[in-house]
Image (cartoon, grey):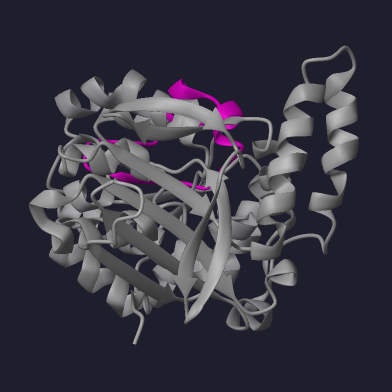
Amino acid sequence: MSSRILLLGATGYTGGLVLNALLRRGVRPTLAGRNATALAALAERSGGLDHVVVDATDTADLKRHLRRGDVLVTTVGPFERLGHSAAAAAAETGAHYVDSTGEVGFVRTVRDRYGERARETGAVMLPAFGYDYVPGILAGTLAARQAGAAVRALDIGYFATGPLWRGISKGTRTTMRDGLTLPSPTWRGHRLAEERTASRVHEFDVQGRRKSAFLVSGTEVLFLPGDFPALSDVTVFNGWFPALSRPLTLISAVANALIRLPGGHHLTSLLTLPLTFGPPGGPDTTERARTRSYVVAVASTGTRGTPPLAEVRLEGPSAYSLTGELMAWAAQRLAAGAGEVAGVVGPVEAFGLEALREGCAEMGLVPEP
């Protein structure tokens, strides 16, 4: 390993998954965080890893522990509130960067605010390099390539198999609830636009059945148009709970109307509170094994009523297991100097399509049989 990997947030749920994935690959990261006692205990349990006490929200503090070519991996969120210092520190020092955010607004800000500086310092910055949203970008890329020159639109749907409600974390349920009152970026008419989350429902063919999914945000709308300039429309949908897709359009409309009223935030929280019900923490190894991720990308001409030009379906491990493996894979490759393009980039631009496809296959994310 030619560069050091600094793992920020290792004592948390997602950080622990990344740490385990790195250790399975024979990689010994340096653990970083604010809680000295918890860090020391985790470092000891993990085979005597190096660890440093650092404040994730202090750019200067982070910069003291980074040098050009290092890799900063962070799972400390919510990223819009807690993540900017880590991104800034990486861009300023020329350290590569990988995070687990699902907050597309944060990714847009990182690209706008730190992209130019990262190119100057040689930092390869990979926000949202997990289940959110690498599988959709890979599936969308494969579908667009199969479709050829006629492709104008991509619809991407995220689904899951197995008893999912117990297979998602408390944090994910809260993020989904909060996301109903945040706009979802889409790529419409060759430009970024914003639509109300869950304002539209789309149906996909999933394992021989038609399943509904509602409109959500996704970094696919930020990165795929750059790879395929002919794309006029890119839209992302979530179909984890197909039966709830249409009811959520109504809940979203009511929540977005309430939030504009005096006391609306409190009313909206009460309305959407049931969406957070479920067990605390995140799914354990057994629970994760019962759920699998499933992503569909449909490429078309964008003309209503015409058949698709291409469809790609990828199936893989649970969203959480896949996130840990993806982030560990990216960190290991960046530490070895495999990043191809500096700046805030997507996974295909960073590593190339074939390397990404092969890496995902090693993790079990493969085309549906």
Answer with the quarter of the image where residue 141 lies: bottom left
Residue in view at x 86 percent, y 50 percent: 274
Residue 345 seen: no
> Can you say which quadrant of the picture contains the C terminus?
bottom left
Q: Is residue 187 above or below residue 59?
A: below
Q: Is residue 328 above or below residue 63?
A: below
- Percent x, y for residue 282? 70, 64
Residue in view at x 24 percent, y 65 percent: 310
Q: Nearer the viewer, residue 275 or 87?
A: 275
Q: Residue furthest front?
A: 305
Q: Is residue 220 above or below residue 322?
A: above
- Percent x, y for residue 100? 48, 49
Q: Is residue 228 magenta?
A: no
Task: Please indicate whether residue 50 sits to the left or right of residue 177 in the image.
Answer: left
Task: Please indicate whether residue 302 sits to the left or right of residue 173 in the image.
Answer: left
- Percent x, y for residue 8? 50, 46
- Percent x, y for residue 318? 54, 72
Residue in view at x 16 percent, y 43 percent: 228
Q: Is residue 106 above or below residue 77?
A: above
Answer with the quarter of the image where residue 192 lies: top left
Q: Nearer the viewer, residue 328 or 148?
A: 148
Task: Please indicate whether residue 80 sits to the left or right of residue 167 in the image.
Answer: left
Q: Is residue 65 magenta?
A: yes
Q: Which residues are magenta?
A: 56-83
Residue in view at x 19 percent, y 37 percent: 226
Q: Residue furthest top?
A: 262
Residue 125 seen: yes
Q: Residue furthest left?
A: 149
